[in-house]
Amino acid sequence: MEGIVAPQRPKRSFLPEEFTVTTWEELKPYFDQLVDQSIESLSGLRIWLRKRSELESVLSEDSGWRYIRMTCYTDNEEYTKSYQDFVQQIQPEIALYSDQLNKKVLGCPFLKELEHELGYGIMIRNLKKEVELFREENIQLMTEITTETQKYAAISGAMMLELNGQELTLQQAGVILQSTDRAKREEVYHKISARRLKDKEKLDELFTKLIGLRYQVARNADFENFRDYMFKAYGRFDYAPKDCFDFHEAIASEVVPILNELSIERKEKLKVNSLRPWDKAVDAEGREALKAFADGKDLTEKSIQCFQKLDPYLGNCLSVMKEMGHLDLESRKGKAPGGYNYPLAEIGVPFIFMNATSTMRDMTTIMHEGGHAVHNFLTKDLELNDFKSPPMEVAELASMAMELISMDQWQIFFPNDDELKRAKRDQLEDIIETLPWVATIDKFQHWIYENPTHTTAQRKENWNRIFDEFADTITDWSGLQEAKDYLWQKQLHLYEVPFYYIEYGMAQLGAIAVWRNFKQNKAKGLEGYMNALKLGYLKTIPEIYVAANVKFDFSKAYIKELMSFVRGELETLK
């Protein structure tokens, strides 16, 4: 591709250029060198930190590729085995050494001199947290958790259904829920639901096992429950569980009423006696589903163009990924569900994985993951690996703000004015739906881990109680109780990344504020957004939000103010 220069891997100064990760035996000497090396000066400490960072980058990228290949082809035994080897043979050994290395740094007399330099204070705070959390007996448990977690992707990746003689993934079948033929929607809804429910016991057992293992990890580390352990592990220095509960309350009082209004409007427009779950994705005015692109190739080209028009730098990020083969976008059999952007620490160019079919949601997914990717590009030249790994509240600000900022160029996907308006309206309505769902999943997790010995019957009962708190009161679930009972099982975060979900809510609020700035002044809004991302993890979460000219705030008053802005924007799109 003309003009695209794929970055070269930075020259290594510690590991040999040709070194690749094979076995622990091959890796161990490098860890031993770091443990044994004496640090005689401040400059010696800086060199040592760079060596450690290089080693961590190589390992992180290697495990990244193993994970990427496994999720792209869940039915390839060799890829699964390669990932498991890393998790079972290499990771536990690294964990032991990491603790030694953390203690070595914290015990270094020259560390004090770095404390006030940009980024180092944050890094030191994280190292202290790691040392406080480390327990040798948890290494084996963590390995077991990672191995068990993989089963979720395998179970979900194998979920297929047959429709009119054609075998479809659940993502592909889900597209039909946008059909204007109500009978067809209902049929597909029941088929998807039945296919999910076929594995409900298997997924329930897996979740129960994970809860038990996680509880054990927390107890070993002297925490009362896994929630409190994870708040510490995620480095949530800037907020506490109480703030999450305030967020839940604010969503229930400020967002759920708007969700109800939209549901009443939808029911009236569809002219149905009762609004059913299969009536939620179809266009309320009976128009055919929006089609944003033809196939993966078209999606790639249009996304590059969209980013390019916002800012040439943004377009170049996606172009480089395309050139390097770092995009796998289309849904197919044997592919794990979901979508992600995987940072590759050494080369600095991430990988985007998706399950695109042809929906508008797929288009916004690449905008979202593209936001994460841009974040990786903007931080790839920071000095240490630690500086490049921002907390999730910042990472999700990058992706969710990009979904909204990119609307400025959506005419590339929707050249027709009416369709463009409709796409933007769908995006804003999606925010009104997303925030209550984030609150639902987060509140459910708090209950799960505050009550780790609960029965599956209690889990079901509390899921329904929490779901009803944040759901609209218009949708009619009669005759669908079992489907509702197990809706939570489709949320992969509960299985794979526990307590990673509230960030979507916090970042969504930040993203609305970033977008509001962008609407007032495009150049300034975009500059603030990119300034915040460039900081990686050099500053605290509130400070990074300030760099974007927004607040890290989830109070009722702030949520009310932002929702009022979104409501106003929705009005202009009628």
Image (spheres, helix red, strand yellow):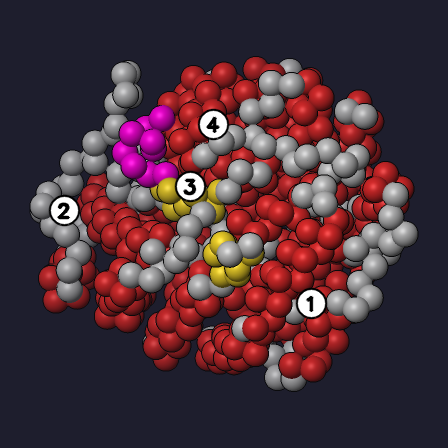
Q: CA distance from mark 1 to mark 4?
A: 35 Å
Q: In the rendered view, does 29 fall on the left or right side of 561?
A: left
Kind of residue at disc 4: Ser
Q: Earlier in the sequence, mark 3 or mark 4?
A: 4
Residue 483 numbered tag = 1
Which residue is disc 2 drawn over? 14
* Viewer-closest of 143 and 186: 186
Q: Is residue 322 magenta?
A: yes
Q: Nearer the viewer, mark 1 or mark 2?
A: 1
* Viewer-closest of 74 and 33: 74
Kind of residue at disc 3: Leu
Q: Could you tell me which residue is drawn at 57 percent across and 78 percent down?
A: 201
Q: Are marks 2 and 3 in contact (CB under 8 Å)?
A: no
Which residue is disc 3 drawn over? 329
Total labels drawn: 4
Q: Could you tell me which residue is drawn at 14 percent across and 41 percent down?
A: 13
Kind of residue at disc 2: Phe
* Viewer-closest of 78 and 469: 78
Q: Position of residue 559 (x, y in %)?
A: 77, 41
Which residue is disc 4 drawn over? 303
Q: CA distance from mark 2 to mark 4?
A: 38 Å
Q: CA distance from mark 3 to mark 4?
A: 12 Å
Describe the element under mark 3 as helix, strand or loop: strand
